Image (cartoon, rainbow, N blue to C red):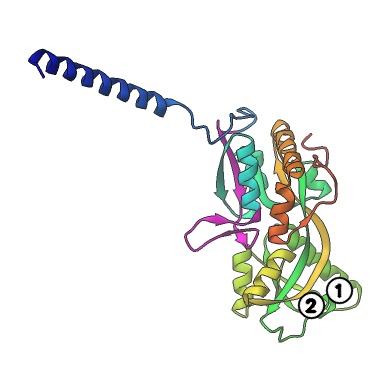
């Protein structure tokens, strides 16, 4: 090769390297195609491109933290799918249940994703979208040494439960029923979360613990406790929102998951009861 040819080849190589570098830089600047274009943006969500959800991950198999510190469970998977279909990145704030409704009103998160149960009172504070059926169970120590099999067996017993949730309310309602029957009331012991309530039962500080059916069955199958009473007070779990436009967008996404089979497959995988209505919708008036 002549000196002139060598010079031309070097110039060509430099131009090729520059072109390659520019192309790579341009490709890096392009938005990732893995996530669809966002279908909703501020002010209807608090952070552009992100769906911020509050969760209290102490209820396996629905919401819990695995051995690696990662969020897992049916509600986590459903929340992730909702975010993906909205073109948003899911972000979770792990927090006690008692702080969730005030935090939603203060716009600390977009959505409560912790299986918050529908009540008429709550439906006037938030936009609530039912998606799951659940009932209350009472766990006993492994082997059920106290022979608890009906709510009357809880009379005078110490029952541990998470503070502020519908499970606490239902436990107190059981106590009221027992008093009306002339029996001793339940000694309700409240804790910051279900993990603490379960630990109290494990340590003998309570005689029973209140939970939802799916979690109680999981705990029994794992050998931690015995599900002594189940199917009490069947009710509906929901997603909750402060923003109506976001709630309506999530309704649309949930209906999409119903049509394409994702919803049924996910709930069948975890053995969770589905809502009976053919389509999803906001239930209640929402904030005034």
**Residue 26 pos. (x, y %):** 39, 23
Q: Residue at x 69, y 84 (%)?
A: 143
Q: For this view, does 19 lie left or right of residue 209?
A: left
> In the rendered view, does 131 fall on the left or right side of 39?
right
Q: Is residue 198 magenta?
A: no
Q: Residue at the far left: name it.
A: 3
Q: Camera-side residue: 160 or 229?
A: 229
Asked if the residues shown at circle 2 and circle 1 are in contact, with their CB atoms under 8 angstroms apart, the answer is: yes
Residue for point 83% across, 75% down? 151
Inspect this view and state whether residue 189 appears. no
Which quarter shows the C terminus? top right
Measured Cα–Cα span from mark 2 to mark 1: 8 Å
Q: Which residue is mark 1?
A: 178
Compare marks 2 and 1 and give the one earlier in the sequence. 2
Q: Nearer the viewer, residue 62 or 105?
A: 62
Is 85 drawn above or below residue 264 in the view shown?
above
The part of the image, by quadrant, that contains residue 279 is top right
Rendered image: mark on residue 154: 2
The span picked out in magenta is 46-74
Is 193 situated above or below 75? below
Residue at x 60%, y 30% (from the top left corner): 38
């Amino acid at each position: 090769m002549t000196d002139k040819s060598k010079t031309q080849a070097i110039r060509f190589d430099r131009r090729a390297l520059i072109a390659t570098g520019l192309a790579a830089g341009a490709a890096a600047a392009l938005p990732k195609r893995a996530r669809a274009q966002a279908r909703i943006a501020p002010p209807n969500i608090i952070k552009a491109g992100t769906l911020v959800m509050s969760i209290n991950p102490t209820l396996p198999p629905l919401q819990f933290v695995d051995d690696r510190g990662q969020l897992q469970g049916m509600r986590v998977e459903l929340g992730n799918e909702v975010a993906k279909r909205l073109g948003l990145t899911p972000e979770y704030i792990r927090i006690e249940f008692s702080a969730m409704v005030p935090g939603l009103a203060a716009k600390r998160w977009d959505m409560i994703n912790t299986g918050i149960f529908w009540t008429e009172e709550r439906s006037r504070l938030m936009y609530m979208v039912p998606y799951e059926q659940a009932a209350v169970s009472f766990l006993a120590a492994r082997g059920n040494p106290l022979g608890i099999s009906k709510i009357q067996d809880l009379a005078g017993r110490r029952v541990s439960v998470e503070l502020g949730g519908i499970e606490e309310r239902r436990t107190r309602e059981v106590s009221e029923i027992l008093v009306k029957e002339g029996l001793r009331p339940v000694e309700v012991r409240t804790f910051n979360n279900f993990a603490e309530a379960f630990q109290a039962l494990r340590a003998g500080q309570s005689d029973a613990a209140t939970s939802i059916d799916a979690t109680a069955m999981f705990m029994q199958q794992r050998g931690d406790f015995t599900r002594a009473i189940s199917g009490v007070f069947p009710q509906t779990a929901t997603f909750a929102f402060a923003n109506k436009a976001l709630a309506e967008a999530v309704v649309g996404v949930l209906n999409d998951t119903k049509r394409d089979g994702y919803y049924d497959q996910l709930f069948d995988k975890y053995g969770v009861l589905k809502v009976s209505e053919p389509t999803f919708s906001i239930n209640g008036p929402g904030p005034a």
